[in-house]
Amino acid sequence: QVQLVQSGGGLVQAGGSLRLSCAASGRTFSTYAVAWFRHAPGKEREFVGTISRNPAIAYYSNSVKGRFTISRDNAKNTVYLQMNSLKPEDTAVYYCAARAGVATTFYSDFGSWGQGTQVTVSS
């Protein structure tokens, strides 16, 4: 397992951008797949996107495809979620998660989780 620490949340107006960071401990981070999930008030936890270990290939939910980008910098042990063209419905607590294996879209497959970061989009 790895320890995950998130940063980069905040308040932004609709149409704006934010970048979330997920920093991991451990010397084998490059072998971990990382995913992002979000949890809005009164709603089920929702898959946002995931990125595989090398070669790093990202996959996104339809609700964020074309607006969000996931990238990873293994030298810094960090995965990023770049969020552009934000909408009020993107408001949620965002979580990163990691697993030592292939990338999946299912939260139950991930054993390591960040603490969560609030993203609020106003209109």
Image (cartoon, helix red, strand yellow):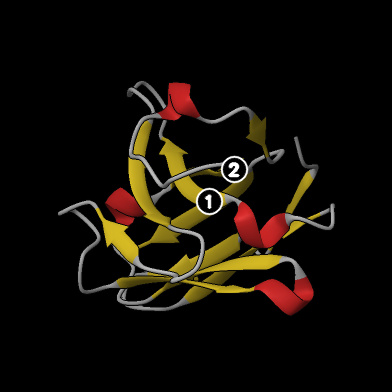
Residue at x 40% of width, y 53% of height? 50
| Residue 68, quarter of picture | bottom left
| Alpha carbons under labels 2 and 1: distance apart | 4 Å
The answer to which of 62 and 2 lies nearer the viewer is 2
User: In x, y percent, where is residue 58?
Assistant: 35, 65
Q: Which of the marked residues, 2 or 1, is nearer the chain's N terminus?
A: 1
Q: Residue furthest right?
A: 26
Mark 1: amino acid: Val
Q: Residue furthest left?
A: 62
Residue at x 31% of width, y 55% of height? 88
Determine crowd level at label 1: few under 14, some 14-19, many 20+ residues with C-alpha closer than 10 A: many
Do tag 2 and tag 1 residues touch (Cβ < 8 Å)? yes
| Mark number, residue 120 | none
User: In x, y percent, where is residue 45?
Assistant: 39, 28
Mark 2: amino acid: Ala
Asked if one can make out residue 117 in the rendered structure from this viewpoint, the answer is yes
User: In x, y percent, where is residue 25?
Assistant: 84, 53
The answer to which of 85 and 81 lies nearer the viewer is 81
Above or below, 92 relative to 79: above
| Residue that carries the numbered disc 1 in the rendered image | 34
| Residue that carries the numbered disc 2 in the rendered image | 98
Taking the image as shown, residue 104 lies to the left or right of residue 3, namely: left
Q: Secondary structure at mark 1?
A: strand
Determine crowd level at label 2: few under 14, some 14-19, many 20+ residues with C-alpha closer than 10 A: many
Q: Secondary structure at mark 2?
A: strand
Residue at x 60% of width, y 41% of height? 100
Above or below, 8 relative to 71: above
Taking the image as shown, residue 81 lies to the left or right of residue 112, namely: left
User: In x, y percent, where is residue 21?
Assistant: 65, 65
Asked if one can make out residue 22 in the rendered structure from this viewpoint, the answer is no
| Residue 106, quarter of picture | top left
Taking the image as shown, residue 48 lies to the left or right of residue 53, namely: left
